[in-house]
Amino acid sequence: MTYGLLMNLLDMVVMIGIYSIAAISLNLEYGFTGLSNFGKVAFFMVGAYTYAILAQAGVNFGVCMVASAVSAAAFGFLVSLPALRLREDYLAIVTLTSGEILRTIIQNQGIGGGYNGISITQIFHFQTLMAIRLANIGLAFAFLGICFIFSQLVANSPYGRIMRAIREDQTAAQSYGKNIQRYKSQVFIMGSAIAGIGGALFAQYSAHIEPGSFLPFLTFTIWMMVMLGGPGNNLGVILGAAVVQIFQKSAAILKDYVHLPVDPINVQYILFGILIILVLFYRPSGLLKESPVKPPKLKEPVNV
Amino acid sequence: MSKIDPMILRVRDVVKNYGGLCAVAGASLDIPRRTTIALVGPNGCGKTSLLKTIFGLQRADEGSIYFEGESIDELQPNEVFDRGIVHAFQFPRLFNQMSVLDNMLIAARGNRGDRFAGSLFSRKKWREQEETMLQKATDTLKLMDLTRLTNEPAGSLSGGQKKLLEISRAIMAEPKLLLLDEPAAGVNPVLAKKIFEKIEMFRHGGMSLLIIEHRMELVMEFANWVYVMDRGKIVLEGRPAEVAASPLFYEIYIGGEPGGTDICVS
């Protein structure tokens, strides 16, 4: 195995960690609560830019991470105010446009370097690229672990049961005393905060971000991860993130090593489309099925 | 000095229009505590609309509704639920991908884990609470013959079983006033009677009921008072036997003369 290929593989693992965080955040919103957030990239971008701007100003890493999560959550709250009063399909439209609007504003108003973006020094200063990549893998998966545990705790509690109930039937959930606006807003804030963490790690790892890094395609990639992995299953969406990322990166790697008459990256877009259609047709529940909320143990067994 | 309203619910001149269609045209009714009130009338006369308006699923255009002496006109369904009214849907609206048990536990009141902070930081508390709730849920399911389906997804139940679960879920919420929209529809006659017997049991426990029902034999047996609705208005009220004996009732409900039991026991 050549050194270049190994570096590419390590890069892929880092990105799997970062995308998994984004997938977990979308899973909270869509997988458990049924909120179609098609503007995931916006919250990812808010996290990334907050991190980049603060890190460039010399703020300490931990503070940058917290600030990224908080600013993304605040942006999520702002978007949720009008958006969550809308019906499902309109929510998708509003969130999709909010992402594009934010990107255009950043690009044209010169925020964070405008079109040229912003460069950040990485937090790891090791001699070799390999050591830096390995450290980044550790960092990404540590944060993934935190987000995963948080998401599991929330989803497997009475709160998570209400999230699912809202997904199944909002009117019925409201008829059983659940303030659905409040729940949806909270979930949106949680999801945005986690996406912000993902964005911050992305900025830290890439060392340079620009508006062009946050095209709507990123949102669709995250959606693919969730749909493929299994909405409503946190392990599933991590698996989905891994599969999609392996797919994407191997196309890019292939480009360097194999000479094909067509660009593998273009082929990859086509294959993605086919993959999504196949998943929706033959396995709409994704690779891993949703796990039910664990009920407390019955003292006496139920007589069947 | 506060006076306790002898009526748990007062509905005054409620009007509800859907565009040009007047579904409820000034209906008034009273529900005393611990009674079963039946609301009957031909299809499309506004019974379900009235029930939905009481529960806050839609706003009344005119009129007012008082629950335990307080106005509930402006409240959202979740707030109405918090006051103590529960509405079981005419066509069951279950959480289909969730288990029967989860459907029951959703309805339980006062779970600390329902709140975000509580779900994370009072894990021990809500686990204890859930044990009590679980006991109650399994007891209620047993009462409704749904025990063996406890862990099945609600969506896989048959039509009648869904109806039973809808009612069980409503009972799980310990209502002071239960609004039931055709509880016996789609349920076999033996089970329908059983449902009404259970409901009667809960009434003795202190619950009041407003039931829309077409099966007159059940109304005759279980209702304490009957309101007859026609074209959006309450046109007749009285004890079941009085109503059943009234020629007006036959005219509007069945469209004919009192002919015999074969018509009313359909």
Image (cartoon, rainbow, N blue to C red):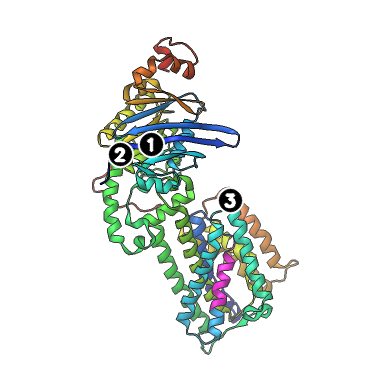
Residue at mark 1 = B10
Q: Is residue B216 above or below residue A296?
A: above
* Magenta span contains residue A293: no
| Residues beneath discs 3 and 2 located on the same chain | no
Residue B19 lies in quadrant: top right
**Whole-percent x, y for residue B228 in the image:** 43, 24
**Mark identifier at residue B5:** 2
Q: Chain of mark 2?
A: B
At numbered mark 1, what does the secondary structure look like: helix, strand or loop? strand
Whole-number angstrom distance, CA of label 3 to CA of label 1: 51 Å
Q: Amino acid at mark 1?
A: Arg
Reply above or below: B92 against A98.
Answer: above
* Magenta run includes residue A42: yes
Q: Nearer the viewer, mark 3 or mark 1?
A: 1
Image coords of residue B71 (percent x, y): 40, 44
The single residue placed furthest to the left in the displayed view is A300
Depth check, mark 3 against mark 2: the one in front is 2
* Residue closest to the far front: B1
Span colored in magenta: A39-50
- State yes or no: discs 2 and 1 in contact (Cβ < 8 Å): yes
Judging from the image, mark 1 belongs to the subunit labelled B
